[in-house]
Image (tube, helix red, strand yellow):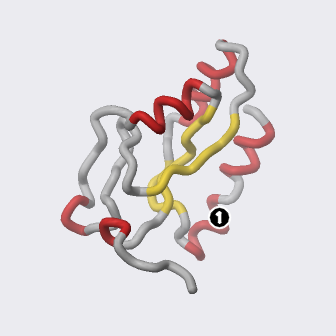
Amino acid sequence: MSSLVKRALMKRDVNREINAIVTWNDKVEEEEEVMIRRDLEPYPIAIKDIIDVKDLRVSMGSKVFINRIAERDSKVVERIRVSGGVVIGMTNTHEFASGVTTT
């Protein structure tokens, strides 16, 4: 496992307190191996919980869609993966991305 991806995954304990990542990707190691076979240096990236990532829960911050699983990657995620990105999870968002998180 690359050092960047490994360090990102080590932050899971910290995340329990701040809840920044609401869904973790259980297939990180498999995806990373694909990048390595393609001679790409894998880098970890978290995607906002409003963008589809295949096989991950995408709730858009809403309880209405809490069980929605994306059937395919969005175009932006496709491009991230082509360049070596390994999606480690989905980041927290206000419902439908319609609010302000910080001031």
Label 1 element class: helix
Residue 6: x %, y % from top left: 73, 43
**Quarter of the rendering occupied by the N terminus:** top right
- Based on the displayed image, in which of its 4 quarters is residue 52 positioned? top left
Local crowd at mark 1 within 10 Å, few (<14), some, or many (≥20)? few
Residue drawn at x 34%, y 49% is: 57
Residue 28: x %, y % from top left: 57, 36
Q: Is residue 17 left or right of residue 66?
A: right
Front residue of 24 and 80? 80
Q: Is residue 96 above or below residue 86?
A: below
Residue drawn at x 56%, y 50% is: 46
Residue drawn at x 45%, y 79% is: 100
- Based on the displayed image, in which of its 4 quarters is residue 43 positioned? top right
The single residue placed furthest to the bottom in the displayed view is 103
Three-letter amino acid code at disc 1? Asp
Front residue of 98 and 18? 98
Residue 21: x %, y % from top left: 52, 61
**Quarter of the rendering occupied by the C terminus:** bottom right
Q: Is residue 90 above or below residue 20?
A: above
Residue 90: x %, y % from top left: 48, 53
Residue drawn at x 35%, y 37% is: 55
The single residue placed furthest to the right in the displayed view is 3
Query: How many circles with numbers are drawn on the protein?
Result: 1
Q: Is residue 14 left or right of residue 58?
A: right
The single residue placed furthest to the left in the displayed view is 64
Residue on which the image places disc 1 = 13
